[in-house]
Amino acid sequence: MATFEVGAVPFNPDGWGPPETSATTTAINVPFAPFSRSDKLGRIADWTRNLNNPANRSGRNNPSESVFDFTGDDSFAATLAADEDSSFRLVDGKPPPRPKFGPKWRFHHNQNRQFPQRRDEEVEARKREAEKERARRDRLYHLNRGGNTQRREAAIFKSSVEIQPEWNMLDQIPFSTFSKLSFSVPDPEDLLFCGTLEPYDRSYDRVTPKNERRLERFKNRNFFKVTTTDDPVIRRLANEDKATVFATDAILSTLMCAPRSVYSWDIVVQRVGNKLFFDKRDGSQLDLLSVHETSQEPLPESKDDINSAHSLSVEAAYINQNFSQQVLVRDGKKVTFDEPNPFANEGEEVASVGYRYRRWKLDDDMYLVARCELQSVLEINNQRQFLTLNALNEFDPKYSGVDWRQKLETQRGAVLATELKNNANKLAKWTAQALLGSADMMKLGYVSRVHPRDHFNHVILGVVGYKPRDFAAQINLNMANMWGIVKSIVDLCMKLNEGKYVLVKDPSKPQVRIYEVPADAFENDYVEEPLPEEEQAQPPAEDANVVSAEISVAATDVEDKEIDADTLSAVPCGTNSNGESMLCIFCADN
């Protein structure tokens, strides 16, 4: 068994270190330096020194460093090899931080010469921090742009209508040509008023996030989104040669605000004789409301997700309809116009809406007639004011970055600015419709989900009123430019031969294309081909067996998970409001 023997260690009773008369031979030629307890202990051994470096040689002049410097001893020459020295790295070579405030800086005024150097160091430090922050923002910006590009390619790389192979593309107009257009029209002429308006309830102007109101449902009130050629009043005006061009305010606002659109849309154009009709298809996206169309934040791509673009557009349309009826005084004094609602049956409960048929002069021998909608009326100082009612909806604060419940009461301007950024096209179209109908006030409601994952129940957080012209100036909406866009498209379509055409906003480029389509395109037996069933407007219901509801014909509430099919009736193409067969103005002439 191996043993370990401890050598003799001499004891020095007179001081520190080995005795002078020690006879030990175990530490021959090992250098050591005598020291006392009062000496300042530096380093035991410095293995990083290099004798060939003159900077290190200068350290020998310092006694506190040269006392324990063994690099000059020949017995340690083997440890100074260059390959071993290169393997050592200094962990931290920065000098220790100096305190900003202390005795040196507080009382010694004779050291003022150090202040400029100190100030320069602080300036440099701030510059470095600013560079780091700028680099971080650049990374986030490029990251967001990359995510937005993927979202846009996935979201709008799909046309609103399927382009058929037999369609013939006639022309394409880039949106850049619309920016310089300008056309002034004289004040419009009112031809006819139809429908009934209910007064606005002013108590909703005092609604705040602290005293929010639940969004109600209106299952028994019917809404009508009838296209131009199915309107019996427009047919009558066309037979009386009241105008050359016919449209609705929804179609005109889509054309006027086309440069702000991102998603694809389509408008059917019919040239009959010397007349021009702008129509929308059955189940068109014009009956829905886009959400986060101009936002930079990506939305879920799955259509089954409650926060997908399609689901949000259907939800927003139902919220908008229910809001427009809830903020009314239902038992108040109604305003009835010359003719009743042209689309309602006798005894049928319809939504509060007034149709204003107006005529604009586009040229010496060219007039445009449009049906404009108003939702409410208000008596102020014995003067009647017409209102339009629309609702913005919040679905999840993490997408917009602004929580309405926290910011709406104290920072309403920030909330509106965020909505203008994320929904620029929708707000511009609402403003254009209010201007077309000469509404005195446009009311914007702020409606939010009760919970971000519950898309059936909503609450009203506030209502704000704006004058349409002031709001148009605020969002940089030029009326002359909007009429210039309409005039240019009308002039282009008037040069076409008789037939049916379709204007399609390109899904991936800022431009609109004109296609010549067959005469039977978009009829009842044709509509399912360009727009599959899963892309039709569906109510936000969880029950898969619920009857599919189109937003253009019936009001139903998104709070209900089962939709009453009786309220989803519409006036079909080719019939009047009583269900009787009708000839269109084209067949009537024959």
Image: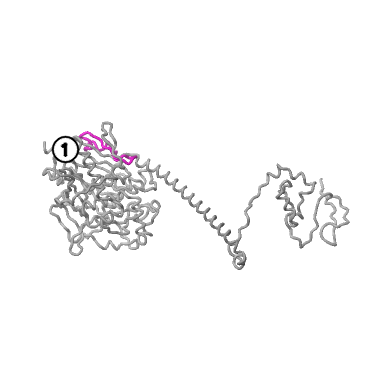
- Outermost residue on the top side: it is 166
Q: Is residue 61 magenta?
A: no
Q: Position of residue 200 (x, y in %)?
A: 23, 60
Q: Which residues are magenta?
A: 505-533
Q: Let me know if residue 469 appears in the view.
A: yes
Amino acid type of the residue that numbered disc 1 sits on in the rendered structure: Val
Dot 1 alpha-carbon crowd within 10 angstroms: few under 14, some 14 to 19, many 20 or more: some
Q: Residue 509 colored magenta?
A: yes
The image shows residue 362 at horizontal and vertical percentages of 18, 45
Q: Residue furthest bottom?
A: 107
Q: Which of the pair 215/560 is nearer the observer?
A: 215
Q: Quadrant of residue 336?
A: bottom left
Q: How is the image coloured?
A: one colour
Quarter of the image where the N terminus is located: top right
Q: Please state if 227 lies on the left or on the right of 559 as rendered.
A: left
In screen coordinates, is 158 left or right of 192?
right
Mark 1, secondary structure of its residue? strand
Q: Is residue 15 above or below residue 172?
A: below
Residue underneath mark 1:
272
Task: Locate residue 148, reporting x and y percent.
Answer: 40, 45
Report the label total: 1
Q: Is residue 210 left or right of residue 70?
A: left
The quarter of the rendered structure image containing the C terminus is top left
Residue 340 x, y percent position in the rendering: 14, 52
Residue 161 vertical placement versus 12 (above, below)? above
**Residue 533 visible here:** no
Q: Main secondary structure of the magenta part?
A: loop
Instruction: Name the residue: 21% across, 39% down.
Output: 493
The answer to whether residue 493 is left or right of residue 79 is left
Pick the residue in front: 586 or 501.
Answer: 501
